[in-house]
Amino acid sequence: MTFSSVSGPRHSAKQLMKSEPPMQPPRTSASGRSALKVAAVLAAGALLASCSELLPMSAEEALVENTPHLGHPIGFAEHDEIIDVELPPAQSHLSRSQWVDVYRFALRYRNESTERLVVILPGRASASRWHPAVGDVRKALASAGVSGKQVAVRGGGRRHQISLKFERPVAIAPQCGHWQKDVARDRERVAYPDFGCATQRNFAGMVANPRDLIGSQAETPASSERRARVWSQYVKGDGANQSATTPSDTTSESKPKAAKK
């Protein structure tokens, strides 16, 4: 029995491995590479966020979080208050009602404004300065306690009209509703971001004179009658004893005691 062999070149394992083409890495498209970059950026951001939560809060940041007027300050804006006084051609002076309106407007200026009161005259200021109605306006301002240094006179107003204007601050309430922080996981034990915002907002809406929030007002003079009495007692040397006793005490002491039956 005969066997026929298949003739052909023989190759070793090394030769077969060299003859095969090398394995190429899978190619990624442009969209795939951009997606990988976005994923890497998100991972880095999450890592930084987790690290920032572990960083201790500074004393200044903790003070702002726990103080409502620092964390939610009340803003201010300037608002113009204007009053127009009509002057009919046949009328030279202000009427009684117009004089009262100017007087009350000057009182508001003293209480609400820190700038100068502007008086706008019709036409040129030099020509209208000597109008009888302008003199009445000056008298009304002086009666309200507004000096000439606080008044600025300008021209260019409407015909037969005197306008008075001043700027006053208006309180602007802060915006509330900051609930982006998880208050259940607070490592610093500080107040939540919206702490005190509602109080600040209500305070800005209820304040009668927003100028009081900017700075303190000037004090009114003390009672001269009471001060003169106390000072005279001090000069006599019996101020300590007299100030301690009240009129009711002196009256009760002056009455003789009833005799016992």
Image (cartoon, rainbow, N blue to C red):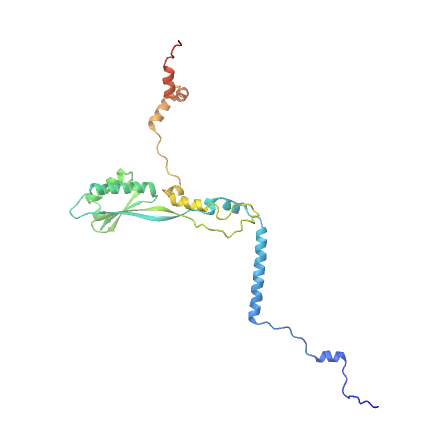
Is 107 located above or below residue 43 in the figure? above
- Is residue 222 shown left or right of residue 135? right
When asked about the image quadrant of residue 37, the answer is: bottom right
Residue 27 point in image, percent of width and height: 61, 73
Decide which of 4, 147 is in the foreground and name it.
4
Residue 106 point in image, percent of width and height: 28, 42
Q: Which residue lies furthest to the top in this view?
A: 261
Q: Which residue lies furthest to the left in this view?
A: 90
Q: Residue at 35% x, 23% y: name it.
A: 229
Number of marks present in the image shown: 0
Q: Quarter of the image containing the N terminus? A: bottom right
Q: Quarter of the image containing the C terminus? A: top left
When asked about the image quadrant of residue 4, the answer is: bottom right
Residue 63 point in image, percent of width and height: 51, 44
- Is residue 140 shown left or right of residue 5? left
Decide which of 57, 143 is in the foreground and name it.
57
- Is residue 53 shown left or right of residue 148? right
Q: Residue at 34% x, 42% y: name it.
A: 112
Residue 178 point in image, percent of width and height: 48, 51
Q: Residue at 27% x, 41% y: name it.
A: 104
When asked about the image quadrant of residue 147, the answer is: top left
Decide which of 210, 191 is in the foreground and name it.
191
